[in-house]
Image (cartoon, grey):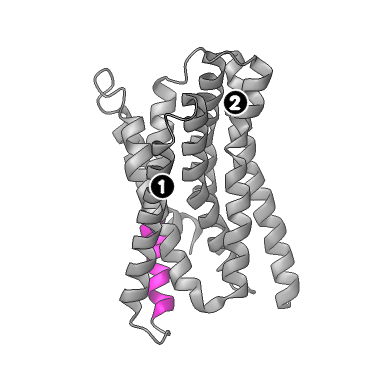
Amino acid sequence: MNRGGFLNSVFILLAILALATWVASTIGAALVSFFKKGEGQMSHIILGFAAGIMLAAGFFELLLPAFEMAEYSAWPGWIIVLAGFLVGCFGIMGLDIILRRMVFAYKQSSILAGAISIHNLPEGFAIGVLLGALPADFRPEELALIIPIILAIGLHNIPEGTAVAISFRREGASKTSAFFLGQIAGLAELLAGILGFFIVTRFDAIMPAALSFAAGAMVWVAVHELIPECQKNKEHHPYLATIGIIIGVALMLILPEIIGV
């Protein structure tokens, strides 16, 4: 397959996968018609599972390949990877700080939607970077390693879509309006995925920095957003979220053996 045909094929795949994560947000938003609260045992274990996969993916699927690719750069590899990782972490943190300073100017529902949109950016960016990093002669098994990341992102988008829709509903929006507003946050992943893909396929030299940036952003989201959120019901179910995290990490550890990579 020539490079042009490869890029077209992978870009179509990227669009499909990124669209799938947006559909998950839409499903979550649709649940506003059935639930009064975006809480529940299942949402905690799903968020824990997503956090576990994102942590493992950040280190094993993004940082390790970044170190390998950085060996061939003019700069010391560890400097490139460390810089990308820190920029990813503190870049998302900076966006979060800016958003929180706007809390007095907008309704709480708008702040929640904005916060979720911001933390969806690195998830979509990571998908785009991982797909863009595939070689032109990639094997199906190599693509299969990305699927659990897509699955984790999609699963935790469901309760997020529900939470945003419920927040707007509580402030007086109709069920229809709450549904449409609840799915908007998922669009951030689609746009970020396209951006990440185009960056790494057009500028191969920045691949290690892009991978480590995506890793830093994903780790920050998992540690700052997902883990605290999934532990909210810890008093009544002390181990549920932690089990979800462990299952997510364990899945990423054994997956290469399962698919033979």
Q: Which quarter of the picture shows residue 168? A: top right
**Residue 64 in view, yes or no:** yes
Q: Residue furthest front?
A: 105
Quarter of the image where the N terminus is located: bottom right
Residue under circle 2?
29
> Where residue 69 sits: x, y (%)?
44, 77
Secondary structure under the numbered disc 2 in the rendered image:
helix
Residue in front for this viewpoint, 200 or 234: 200
> Where residue 71 sits: x, y (%)?
38, 82
Amino acid type at circle 2 is Ala
Position of 48 compared to 206: left or right?
left
For the point 40% across and 87% down, which residue is it? Answer: 74
> Where residue 45 sits: x, y (%)?
39, 30
Position of 173 compared to 45: left or right?
right
Is 241 drawn above or below residue 51 in the view shown?
above
For the point 61% across and 16% down, which residue is it? Answer: 173
Residue under circle 1?
53
For the point 49% across and 44% down, which residue is it? Answer: 118
Is 163 drawn above or below residue 121 in the view shown?
above
For the point 30% across and 29% down, which residue is it? Answer: 231
Q: Which residues are magenta?
A: 58-70
